[in-house]
Image: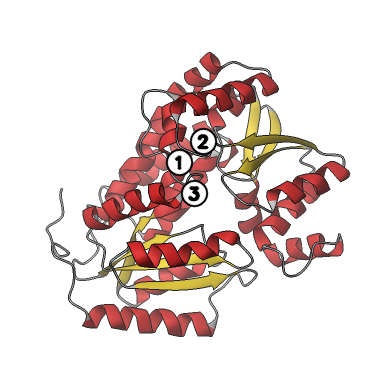
Amino acid sequence: MEMGRRIGITATVPVEVLLAAGYQPLDLNNLFINDPDPERLLGIAERDGFPQNCCSWIKGIYAVCMERGIDTVLCVTSGDCSNTLMLMEVLKLKGLETVPFAFPEEPDPGRMRQCLESLAQRLGTGLASAEGMRTRLKNSRRLAHRLDELTWRQGRVSGWENHLWLVSSSDFNGDFQAYEQGLAQVVAQAERRSPYPDDMLRLAYIGVPAVFARDLYPFVERYGARVVFNETQRQFAMPRPGKSLAEQYSHYTYPYPLIHRIADIRRELRRRRVDGVIHYVQAFCHRGIADIVFRHAIDLPMLTVEGNDEFTLSQHLRTRLEAFLDLLRRSPRPQGAAAPKSR
């Protein structure tokens, strides 16, 4: 498929509408965090006036746009980051075209359909074309779900691989056909692997992707644990596609009140036989307050870790993670934690 005009996205959005309109969506968060030198990008934003006590993701998004010449950005104004509203103003000041998109306050398919129709009209396409693109993406999403199953049910995929491929489903790395081909190869290889040992601790990761994700997953594996549930990343892959785009993005839990996320998290914690939970919060982010609610709602040991502009695990965080894993080893495992894998 020929790539169209680039459009940056500040969060997971109805990517099918963008593709139907002939755009090549690029998740600016992924471009930032996968840059060989993300600290350099923070410096670009700070030299242009962004304060040090501002979320690194916002600064990274801005710098990626400036450095890569991305001139159109779809900004999620409701259901994601409150800082995006001011980011839009700065991007407009710099001459970029900004397209606002707001998720409904509640996951209602009727209201979601109205949002989709409005976005499609703004981008010069229609909902029927977007539904056609949804059909074309079904196999990519099916493969992502299979990778997830190979992670938690069969133990043949690492937490890092799971994170990497699921988080990339926000924009399919800018090329959904190449994404599908690459993921198909990974799934086929994983199905032939030997599984991880049954006695490894089983962890859940909830919250936005961590700035130090590349370090986090292999670190816990070295200490006899592995992540079998990446909450937000799994949501990017649309685990409940429904019968229409409106249903699909109503089932996507992240933009909506915490009660919907909590219901999904608690269901998956039981299903995946999780021993303990790591909750990542981003510094200077209003979503960090959600930790109060999660601790009340989740009846498992939980470690809350914060990050902002350190892209590797600090010694302090390493020590805290080691202590948490030691605690889990000394605690009784949840009933069914050692259940046999399904082949």
What amino acid type is highlighted by mark number 3? Val
The earlier-in-sequence mark between 3 and 1 is 3
Marks 2 and 3, how far apart at CA: 15 Å
Q: Position of residue 12 (x, y in %)?
A: 55, 42
Mark 2 sits on what residue?
178
Marks 1,2: beta carbons within 8 A: yes
Marks 2,3: beta carbons within 8 A: no
Marks 1 and 2, how far apart at CA: 6 Å
Q: Could you tell whether 87 is left or right of 266 in the image?
A: right
Q: Position of residue 43 (x, y in %)?
A: 79, 65
Mark 1 sits on what residue?
182
Q: Identify the element where label 3 is drawn.
A: helix
Mark 3 sits on what residue?
167
Pick the quarter of the image with the N terminus. top right
Question: Dividing the picture into quarters, in which one does residue 144 lie?
Answer: top left
What amino acid type is highlighted by mark number 2? Ala
Q: Position of residue 59 (x, y in %)?
A: 73, 58
160, 229: nearer the viewer: 229
The answer to whether 25 is drawn above or below residue 121 in the figure is: below
How crowded pointer 1 is (Cα within 10 Å; few <14, some 14-19, many 20+) is rated as: few
The answer to whether 238 is drawn above or below residue 58 in the figure is: above
**Is residue 142 visible to us here?**
yes
Question: What's the residue at 15%, 49% (across, down)?
Answer: 342
In this view, the mark in front (2 or 3): 3
The answer to whether 164 is drawn above or below residue 335 in the figure is: above
Question: What's the residue at 31%, 73% (across, down)?
Answer: 301
